[in-house]
């Protein structure tokens, strides 16, 4: 199985140990420029990865990212963004509802009769539908994150 170098983890571990790039390069027996390229996102060779793993006293796999796990994380991030966008759209819809309801009430009070009840009813139904959709998405997302769907 092919593993991609987790360059952020290498940099984070180095900084957590308060090691300079020079110190880690010396411990691993690799060039400083090589370490700098790795920390800037360039992939490391298997020998360099083994040397870095030895310097950190971990297995080589600990310095790698499984492409399947990375792809799953990207999908999760996109789902999270979609749910956030749906929440925001619901809040905007609710704010507009308050304004529209106030306008409809003002019109009705001005005319002396509740003539705007049907438009207000339809605006309310639309808001409730939007809220129901948000609730379903939130429940499905929570179920999925808790290991639903046979994950």
Image (cartoon, rainbow, N blue to C red):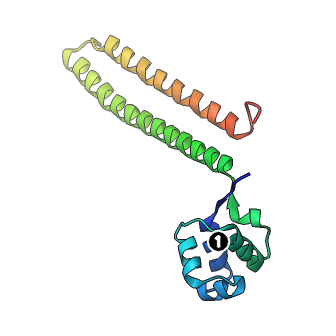
| Residue 61 against residue 147 in the figure, above or below | below
Q: Viewed as shown, does residue 144 lie left or right of 43? A: right
Which quarter shows the C terminus? top right
Name the residue tied to disc 1: 10
Is residue 124 visible to the viewer in this orientation of the structure? yes
Between 128 and 84, the one lying in front of the other is: 84
Between 113 and 90, the one lying in front of the other is: 90
Residue 46 in picture, x, y percent from top left: 70, 67
Residue 142 in picture, x, y percent from top left: 66, 37
Q: Viewed as shown, does residue 143 lie left or right of 35? A: right
Residue 34 in picture, x, y percent from top left: 57, 78
Is residue 18 visible to the viewer in this orientation of the structure? no
Which residue is rendered at x = 32% and y = 14% of the image?
A: 119
Which residue is rendered at x = 53% and y = 42% of the image?
A: 78
Residue 20 in picture, x, y percent from top left: 60, 86
Q: In the figure, residue 141 lies in which quadrant?
A: top right
């Amino acid at each position: 199985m092919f593993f991609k170098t987790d360059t952020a983890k290498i940099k984070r571990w180095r900084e957590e140990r308060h090691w300079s790039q020079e110190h880690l390069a010396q411990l691993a027996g690799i060039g400083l420029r090589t370490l700098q390229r790795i920390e800037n996102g360039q992939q490391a060779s298997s020998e360099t990865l083994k040397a870095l793993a030895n310097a950190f006293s971990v297995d080589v796999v600990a310095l790698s990212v499984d492409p399947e796990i990375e792809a799953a994380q990207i999908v999760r991030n996109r789902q999270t963004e979609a749910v956030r966008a749906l929440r925001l759209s619901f809040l905007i819809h609710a704010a507009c509802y308050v304004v529209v309801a106030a306008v409809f009430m003002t019109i009705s009070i001005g005319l002396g009769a509740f003539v705007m009840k049907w438009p207000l009813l339809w605006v309310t139904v639309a808001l409730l539908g939007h809220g129901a959709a948000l609730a379903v998405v939130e429940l499905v997302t929570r179920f999925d994150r808790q290991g639903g769907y046979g994950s």
